[in-house]
Image: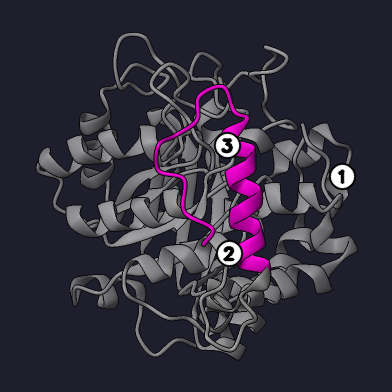
Amino acid sequence: MATKGLLERLHAGEKVVVAEGYIFNFEKRCYIQAGSFVPTAVLEQPELIRQQHLEFVRAGSDVVLAFTYYAHREKLRVTNRLADLESLNRRALQVARMCADETGTLMAGDICNTTAYNPNEPNNKETVKAMFKEQIEWAVEKGAEYIVAETFRILGEALIAIEAIKEYGQGVPAVVTLAIPTHFDGDLTTDGVEITEAMKRLESAGSDVVGLNCARGPETMMPMMEKIKKSGVKVPLAALPVTYRTTKEEPTMMTLTDPKTGKRAFPANLDCFSCTRDDIHDFGRKCDELGIPYIGLCCGNSPHYTRTLCESIGRRPPASVFSPNMALHGVYGTDERLDPYLGKMEIINNESNYKHAPNKPDDIPSAG
């Protein structure tokens, strides 16, 4: 078990870095199907889940997040895997607990949007709450030190989640984050609640940490986080964007269109919108400046991004030993041990290319 709990760290002014993004990570590795996004790899390749947990911790994550996103009853029902519901959740929690114990990090359970919430259906709240209940109870039984409830577009569903955590979580803290969709009437949840009001209602319902995750990249999430920070919310804030370059015109990864084909890029063709490491570094610096203590990355995350995020707030996780060092590059390096021949030839070749370019810059370096 970790020596300090989540709230103890946050209340002491510490930052907590959380690596999310397991669904996209394993889809790219061909172990999860895009579309349903059910984490069947937990049962079929548990050793790879363990490896990914350890890689994220090595890159600086303070938390091992159990891979139970979309492992709820509704998702397994529609993919004909309902018989695996309990075994999948228990295996994911067991692997996460083992990795957290091995590394001295926190372990968190994870619940999420159910895709079954419909306030217009009779008894729907009870159905959704029961789905949360079983996942929360399994997480607590396996030693989760807090529960993440994430990626809710609808405030009403998020409020059911926090109610369930408070009722069945045996006192563990709750981190509740919303995924705000594109809305032409402003920064609203799908059920029409203004974002700062939504945060305040989550806080009033008992959330220990509130904020945003998923859907939006750093560029379109941070303006919302600034509004939330100024709104008077008293509990610690969380920001966990996707690692894609969303824009004001296309503010979520679901709305990004491929510049070559004009087709929607989500989910399989988002590669051309990937953030750079500098983008992630800038995101971390902005969170630090705003005083957002619970930070991380969601869909598209990879260890190199998590390492960059940690370095942006002054940390050097174990993986930093292999952070880029161009001083020893054979062509572009500056180390005195390198033979300068290749570097000089590169400058000459570039100079030749620029001379034949239609708009030649005036500051071509000399090859002399």
Q: Cα distance, mark 1 to mark 3? A: 59 Å
Residue 22's spot in the image, x, y percent? 66, 55
Q: Nearer the viewer, residue 199 or 346?
A: 346
Q: Nearer the viewer, residue 211 or 342?
A: 342
User: What amino acid type should be assigned to the residue bearing mark 2?
Assistant: His
User: What amino acid type should be assigned to the residue bearing mark 3?
Assistant: Tyr
Which residue is painted at 81% across and 32% down in the image?
78
Q: Mark 3: which secondary structure? A: helix
Tell which tag, 3 or 2, sits nearer the viewer: 3
The magenta stretch spans residue 166: no
Sequence order check, earlier mark of 1 and 3: 1
User: What amino acid type should be assigned to the residue bearing mark 1?
Assistant: Arg
Q: Which mark is residue 12?
A: none
Q: Is residue 89 left or right of residue 299?
A: right
- Magenta residues span 342-368
Q: Nearer the viewer, residue 67 or 159?
A: 67
Residue 198's spot in the image, x, y percent? 27, 32
Q: How many marks?
A: 3
Judging by the rendered image, the residue that carries numbered circle 3 is 354
